[in-house]
Image (cartoon, rainbow, N blue to C red):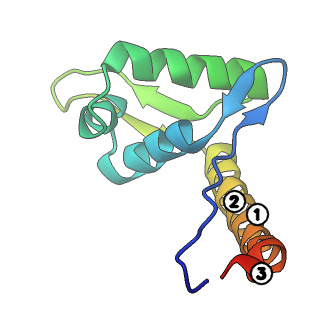
């Protein structure tokens, strides 16, 4: 739109509780990139304990594991995003993109007289 009016949509998915949204999605993408929940949490200025709680709550609500973790030791520990979690991230990103495209059309349609 000429006046720069935009809609910002923040999508949260629910089961019995809020279970998936932009924060957990970003956290999983950071784990994928950095190979560690601790490093991912640090990159987001989040306490490791909070990141762990978020992951566990999400896993409980979704009914599947998001991470496969290895404990530290000589080579150090790490985490790998599970295939189902990767599928969830992709589906969530695609869903958000579709909603944003829809919202842009609805914004244009409903606010065109205010340009």
- Of the two numbered discs 2 and 3 on the same chain, state the one appearing first in sequence: 2
Spatial CA distance of label 3 from label 1 is: 23 Å
Q: Which mark is residue 113?
A: 3
Nearest-to-viewer mark from 3 and 1: 3
Taking 79 as reference, is 53 left or right?
Answer: right
Camera sees residue 63: no
- Of the two numbered discs 3 and 1 on the same chain, state the one appearing first in sequence: 1
Q: Which mark is residue 96?
A: 2
Secondary structure of the residue carrying numbered label 1: helix
Locate the N terminus by quadrant: bottom right
Residue found at x 32% / y 31% = 41
Which corner quadrant of the image does residue 57 belong to? top right
Residue found at x 58% / y 70% = 5
Residue nearest the viewer, comparing 11 with 92: 11
Residue nearest the viewer, comparing 108 with 13: 108
- Are the residues tagged 1 and 2 within 8 Å (C-beta)? yes
Which corner quadrant of the image does residue 82 belong to? top right
Residue found at x 60% / y 34% = 66
Secondary structure of the residue carrying numbered label 3: helix
Q: Position of residue 37 (x, y in %)?
A: 37, 31
Q: Is residue 13 above or below residue 114?
A: above
Q: Which residue is mark 1?
A: 99
Residue found at x 76% / y 63% = 99
Spatial CA distance of label 2 from label 3 is: 27 Å
Residue nearest the viewer, comparing 60 with 84: 60
Q: Position of residue 102 (x, y in %)?
A: 80, 71
Spatial CA distance of label 1 from label 2 is: 5 Å
């Amino acid at each position: 739109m000429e006046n720069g009016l935009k809609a910002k949509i923040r999508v949260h998915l629910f089961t019995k509780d809020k279970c998936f949204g932009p924060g957990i999605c970003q956290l999983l993408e950071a784990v994928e990139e950095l190979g560690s929940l601790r490093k991912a949490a640090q990159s987001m200025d989040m306490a490791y304990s909070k990141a762990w709680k978020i992951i566990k709550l999400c896993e409980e609500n979704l009914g599947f594991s998001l991470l496969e973790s290895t404990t530290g030791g000589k080579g150090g520990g790490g985490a790998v995003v599970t295939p189902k979690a990767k599928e969830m991230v992709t589906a969530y990103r695609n869903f958000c993109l579709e909603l944003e495209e829809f919202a842009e059309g609805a914004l244009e349609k409903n606010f065109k007289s205010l340009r």
